């Protein structure tokens, strides 16, 4: 296979092809569970034939309901600082689709992305022609194959791969690794991984079958009974208490930091750990200075369930005296989130109506009159009319704005606020 001829003239055209089978065939599987139709082994088999699957002894796979992207970044950044040429695959992107794939702090270039996907297109088309008419390639799977080809070309030393919503019927669940991570298990994606939370736990904990060691947050232990025969290699991690958690950042951040640190040691045992800020949680247009919240601050938090909220942090930081903006899809507990925020002290709650031209996401529609819709946003294209102006005005009007919601919503907030994440910020241990 020649990888030198640029098949696509620019990334926009390449991305249109990448999403094409998903966009045209997703509707055939509405209402189905992933286990009823997903065939992730098809793309990983293609990767095997191309001889680009990662070296298991230097590979880390990451899953979980909240924090898997944060943990993936923390591990990859630390391995890179230690001198390993580390390939990182993210799901979803941080700001643009190409930053899903990176080595160190460098994303795949538009030229390389177009070149590799262009070379893969005939192979992908042949595979697609062999499948039933309702089969589609999961976009995350194609991104993964492109990444693995690029990592092979660039001769990376280590691989850190964040999975999609699940494991068992996701490409990540077909790859062998030295260490896997399950950050936590929450009632999300019930319509795809469920119908029960126990089903979600079984799905995510199946990662243990692919890894020499499975590192998990302490909260995952409550689900150990659902897969007792799979978890002989489980390492549960309890984070040390951190007084800063109530003022500067939420406690869950330190939990994820401890999980990432423990997992990294299975790749590089003598690793000197450095704490990095997470792009899933960030302050912009202000922040906390000398223990006080700056007026007009916007704080963004990728929280998908009421249990993700650190109410003590919201109270002590002063954020709960301002307003909250919620961006959740219909498969999340929006009512529970609104209730938890109100109980934390927020008196003004707003929401953004999320939509998808493919139909894979529907907006949560609040039944509470106190929740006011202020904007609409199409998640695939980051299209949100005047989202930046709306957010800044709400922060100014209420003193601060706590923005909370699904990753794709927080990603769009980064896009609207022009937040660059290629250079991680960190602090020494």
Image (tube, helix red, strand yellow):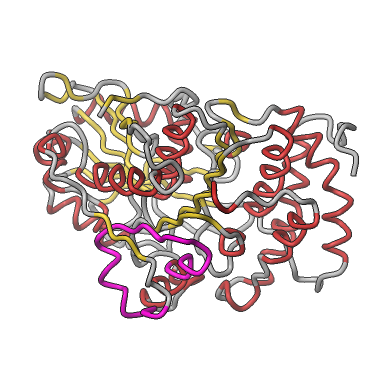
The answer to whether one can see residue 86 in this image is yes
Of the pair 411 and 250, the residue shown nearer to us: 250
Q: Is residue 283 above or below residue 379?
A: above
Farthest residue toward the front? 270
Q: For the point 63% across and 34% down, which residue is it?
A: 98
**Residue 244 figure quarter:** top left
Q: Position of residue 234 (x, y in %)?
A: 35, 65
The foreground one among 382 and 57 is 57
- Front residue of 319/239: it is 239
Provide residue 368's location: percent of width, then percent of height: 26, 59
Residue depicted at x 47% and y 37%: 76
Name the quadrant of the N terminus: top right
Number of marks: 0
Q: On screen, 158 above or below 304?
A: above
Image-based side of 229 in relation to 396, left or right: right
**What residue do we see at 12% from left, 53% from top?**
343
Magenta stretch in the rendered image: 205-229
Q: Can residue 214 be found in the magenta stretch?
A: yes
For residue 45, which quarter of the picture? bottom right
Q: Position of residue 354 (x, y in %)?
A: 47, 50
Q: Magenta region, mostly helix, strand or loop?
A: helix
Is 299 left, or right, of 135 in this rendering?
left
Residue 174 placement: quadrant: bottom right
Q: Residue at x 61, y 78 (%)?
A: 36
Q: Going by the image, does 396 lie left or right of 168? A: left
Question: For the C terminus, which image quadrant?
Answer: top left
Q: Is residue 418 visible?
A: no
């Amino acid at each position: 296979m020649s990888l030198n001829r640029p098949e696509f003239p620019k990334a926009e055209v390449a991305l249109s092809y990448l999403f094409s089978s998903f966009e045209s065939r997703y509707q055939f599987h509405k209402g189905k569970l992933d286990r009823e139709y997903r065939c992730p082994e098809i793309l990983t088999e293609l990767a095997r034939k191309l001889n680009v699957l990662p070296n298991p002894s230097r590979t880390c796979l990451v899953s979980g309901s909240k924090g898997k992207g944060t943990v993936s970044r923390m591990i990859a950044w630390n391995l890179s600082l230690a001198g390993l040429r580390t390939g990182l695959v993210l799901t979803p992107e941080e700001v643009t689709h190409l930053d899903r794939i990176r080595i160190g702090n460098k994303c795949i270039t538009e030229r390389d992305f177009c070149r590799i996907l262009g070379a893969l297109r005939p192979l992908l088309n042949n595979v697609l022609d062999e499948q039933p008419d309702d089969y589609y390639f999961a976009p995350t799977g194609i991104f993964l194959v492109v990444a693995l080809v690029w990592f092979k070309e660039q001769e990376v030393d280590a691989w850190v791969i964040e999975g999609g919503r699940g494991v068992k019927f996701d490409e990540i669940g077909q790859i062998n690794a030295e260490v896997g991570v399950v950050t936590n298990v929450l009632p999300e994606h019930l319509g795809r991984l469920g119908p029960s939370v126990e089903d979600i736990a079984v799905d995510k904990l199946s990662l243990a079958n692919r890894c020499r060691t499975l590192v998990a947050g302490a909260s995952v232990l409550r689900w150990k009974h659902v897969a007792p025969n799979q978890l002989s290699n489980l390492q549960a991690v309890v984070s040390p208490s951190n007084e800063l958690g109530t003022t500067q950042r939420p406690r869950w951040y330190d939990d994820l930091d401890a999980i990432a640190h423990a997992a990294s040691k299975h790749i590089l045992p003598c690793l000197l750990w450095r704490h990095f800020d997470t792009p899933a949680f960030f302050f912009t247009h202000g922040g906390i200075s000398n223990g006080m919240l700056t007026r007009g601050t916007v704080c963004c938090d990728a929280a998908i369930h009421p249990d993700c909220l650190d109410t003590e942090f919201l109270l002590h930081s002063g954020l709960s005296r301002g307003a909250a903006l919620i961006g959740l899809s219909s498969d999340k507990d929006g009512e529970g989130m609104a209730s938890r925020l109100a109980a934390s002290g927020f008196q003004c709650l707003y929401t953004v109506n999320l939509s998808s031209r493919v139909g894979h996401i529907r907006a949560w529609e609040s039944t509470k009159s106190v929740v006011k819709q202020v904007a609409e946003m199409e998640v695939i294209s980051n299209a949100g009319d005047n989202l930046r102006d709306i957010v800044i005005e709400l922060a100014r009007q209420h003193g601060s704005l706590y923005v909370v919601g699904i990753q794709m919503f927080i990603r769009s907030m980064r896009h609207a606020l022009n937040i660059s994440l290629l250079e991680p910020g960190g602090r020494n241990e």
